[in-house]
Image (tube, rainbow, N blue to C red):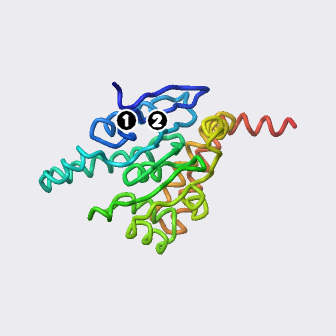
Amino acid sequence: MANVITTTENSIRFITLNRPEKRNALNDELIAELKGALREVGDDEDLRAAVIRGAGTDFCSGADLAALQKIAESSVQENLADAESLMELFLLMREVKIPVVAAVHGRALAGGCGLATACDIVLAAASATFGYPEVKIGFVPAMVTAILRRNLSEKRSFELITQGFNFTAGEALEMGLINRTFSDESFENDVKEYVSVYTKVGRSAVVLSKRLMYGIDGKSFGASLQLGAEINTIARQTEDCKKGIAKFLKK
């Protein structure tokens, strides 16, 4: 059985984590298949957005028991290679040209919460639960910390990664960690309606906006403005922009 299932609806690629009996826990196979699915998204110029979701009752519960056992028994070099595999996934999600959206229902814990956090946009069912509980077993949510510090305040990030408590979708929304919450009953349809916006706006403009958004990380104000000027110039040359301006001028 495939660990990841992909389907396409109206130029939106849905990537479903498919280990429902394990609460979609992460293991080497699932991570490899997820990276493969994201690379396919990156190669498809017809797609407007990608949605990562979980089969069954949960989004993703983090690493499975076998993966934790492997960590305990592996050498330093083996553990580094394993950590770098997850790092590659997080990098890939930002390198994919189009928006990558997490649709979270049930639990998103530990690596599963990290996976959601690494997406460009996070949507959640009202009853969803989030948490970075790694410290409870002496572990560190290390790579997701780089993402949290780009999303939340230093003190809020510190609290989340060092106390390891679970928090609700409502709390995640209030702190700015997720974008929207929807009712459990209409969640699937609400997600589809939300991402359908990307079929109605200029694809190249969204692609360039994502490149700019993450491209200014670590740059000075002046360097960020310079990158903005360069992206703006590229945008002006696209067919989307030329058609958009022509349509606007005809009004």
Q: Give the crowd class for mark 1: few <14, some 14-19, many >=20 residues within 10 Å.
A: few
Task: Give left or right: position of 232 versus 223.
Answer: right
Give me the disc on residue 21. Answer: 1
Mark 2 and mark 1: span between their CA atoms? 8 Å
Where residue 247 sits in the image (x, y, percent)?
79, 35
For residue 73, above or below residue 42: below
**251 displayed left or right of 87:** right
Residue 36: give x, y in percent of width and height. Answer: 36, 33
| Residue at (39, 41) in percent of width and height | 23
- Dots 2, 1 in contact, CB < 8 A: yes
Q: Which residue is mark 2?
A: 56
- In primary-sequence order, the first of circles 2 and 1 is 1
Give the residue drawn at x 39%, y 62%. 145
> What is the quadrant of the C terminus in the image?
top right
Residue 4 or 238: which is nearer the viewer?
4
In the image shown, does 79 or 243 lie closer to the viewer?
79
The percent position of residue 48, horizontal first and vertical second, equals 58, 34
| Residue placed most toward the observer, 195 or 183 | 183
Q: Residue furthest bottom?
A: 155
Q: Secondary structure at mark 1?
A: helix
> Which residue is depicted at the point 65% across and 45% down?
183
Quadrant into which the N terminus falls: top left
**Disc 2 residue crowd, few under 14, some 14–19, many 20+, Cα 10 Å:** some
| Residue 115 % position (x, y) | 42, 48
The three-letter amino acid code for the residue at tag 2 is Gly
Is the residue 1 above or below the residue 122 in the image? above
Which residue is painted at 46% across and 48% down in the image?
107
